[in-house]
Image (tube, coloured by chain):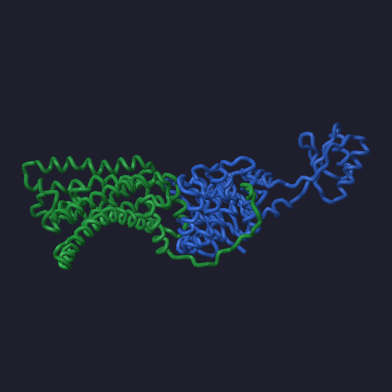
Amino acid sequence: MTIIVTDGLTKTYGGGVTALADLTVAVDAGVIGLVGANGAGKSTFIKIMLGLLPPTSGSVRVFDLDPVTETDQVRARVGYMPENDCLPGDVSAAEFVTHLARMSGLPKTAARERASEALRHVGLYEERYRQIGGYSTGMKQRVKLAQALVHDPDLLLLDEPTNGLDPAGRDAMLGLVHRIGNEFGISVVVCSHLLGEVERICDSLIAIEGGRLLRADRISSMTEASDILAVEVADGTDELAAALAAVGLTATRDGRMLLVPLQSDAAYDRILRAVADLDLNLHRLDQRRHRVAELFTTKETADV
Amino acid sequence: MSEAGVIHDIGYQRYSGPRLGRLALQQALYVHGLRSAFGLGRSAKAKIFPWLVFGIMLLVAVIVAAVRAVGGESILSYTSFADQMSFLIIFFVAIVAPQLVSRDLRAGTLPLYFSRPLRAADYVSAKYAAMVSAIWLLLGVPQFVMFLGAAFTTEDGFKGVWNEIGDLLPGWGYSLLWALMFAGISLLIASFTGKQAFAAGGIVAVMLMTTPIVGVLASLPNTTANSLAGLASPVFLIAGVGEWLRGTGGMELDLGRFGPIYGIEAVCLIAACLLLLLARYRKVASL
């Protein structure tokens, strides 16, 4: 199911700053990574989807609704977690999330129930009755996520959810996002400037740079392209390269390693035989999946 | 119980219940605002000042009622009660308006509000209504206490109670005028800063610093200037409107024939405050 469709979406701010330029993309349900450097236009894109900013030209449809004219219907189905600190310090998480649930139109009792449930899902239990001011950064991020989740949206827009978290906190947050996307059945757009972080949990990726679309595709189609084998031997790397060339494998040298395209499983045997024939010490023979990051690097350099 | 941070698979429940419209959101935000104006649902620290002010005003009302009951003499009428309490009202407003408005700015909560169906107009009207209600309750409840004291000790029976009601209702109306005016001005000032102390200082400054201007204008050897002096300060403006509408007043302003000007300025001032608030939040809402 396609949830977000944009067509020639452009946003120019007052001072002539172009935040988004001619963005055309169709996004399927699932966990979607929105990747780009700071200032690439990620936050602008999110604000346009929420109906907070009108696009300068082009169109955007979320669940086939127009955020500009059907703002309420869109916002009822979308949860937003902003990047910045947005929590008052002198109320408890339970109270705060309940209040925001009511601001999403939930009746009083339902708001209270869903607030404690949302807080439980993000991993806050008895702490939820303590004042937010005393929370750690990780707990605050969880409260921010809970308030986005409290009105049971069909789509979550998370702006840098791992901001300010330590590695363990990052993993926990990403795990949570993955769980929301896969077990709760809620689509998630995760904004990040760290590609390596989101590619682990995403089904598809949208990469933007300077407001322009770099690439939008499913992760699987990005990584399946071609697998390569990395071969590392103690000495005689050059001899091995020559031997591999002789048996029809084109090896490229990468530092101490040889990278060999994996055309068939027979390549393993051929490499092993070549190494044995030359009587070399094999240190490493492993299959390397194309990292998504590499795909972008090559694409970017090609563009430049 | 479980360790913090561990997520248990209890299953996620979808919500299929009703989603209320914007009117319900406004009501919820209004009730939330009114409660937090008196520190309800908040820390004990937030309750001190509103309830201190409310307590003092209630005490004054009880004393007035007691004096009336014992001596049968009214030392403070319903309308002059508000005028006499003006410093306390300013104090109350300076504490409460930043609570309602600056806190959201300071904590950055507004993006969370405005990414929901709530609009800038809903936010402004709910907060304004909450502020108006808070000020009106602050004045209206002590006035009602005064009324009870007078009504139970009246010697004219039902007619005496009826007369008291006739006095109380204009008094409540006058309190509403105070509430409408002060809520507008104080919220507008508070909406410009996230720092509660600055907002409180700004409100007190605007309310009090304008009084000397009134004093200067009132002492000019020009009757027109004297009559218009009250326009320079919100407190005197309200007193002027009250005086114009009722023909007498406690502030001893000499309105001359300029009474309607006071009325027009009061209406314009309230409208301007609301429009500026709306413009301010339109801008904030689009982030």
- Whole-percent x, y for residue A92 in the image: 49, 49
- The residue closer to the viewer here, B38 or A243, is B38
**Colour assignment, chain A:** blue
Compared with B219, B287 (above or below) is: below
The reply, left or right, for residue A84 in relation to residue A215 is: left
Report which quarter residue B194 is drawn in.
Answer: top left
Query: Which residue lies at the image location 39% right of the left edge and 60% below the top edge?
Result: B26
Query: Which residue lies at the image location 14% right of the left edge and 49% below the top edge?
Result: B251
Report which quarter residue B245 is drawn in.
Answer: bottom left
The reply, left or right, for residue B130 in relation to residue B287 is: left
Query: Which residue lies at the image location 29% right of the left edge and 49% below the top edge?
Result: B55
**Colour assignment, chain B:** green
Compared with B26, A200 (above or below) is: above
- Whole-percent x, y for residue A240 in the image: 87, 37
Q: Is residue A74 visible?
A: no
- Whole-percent x, y for residue A271 in the image: 87, 43
Report which quarter residue A54 is drawn in.
Answer: bottom left
Query: Which residue lies at the image location 83% right of the left edge and 41% below the top edge?
Result: A285
Tally of numbered tags: 0
Q: Is residue B81 visible?
A: yes
Farthest residue in the top direction? A235
The reply, left or right, for residue A152 in relation to residue B35 is: right
- The residue closer to the viewer here, A241 or A31, is A31
- Whole-percent x, y for residue A86 in the image: 48, 47
Compared with A137, A27 (above or below) is: below
Farthest residue in the front direction? B70
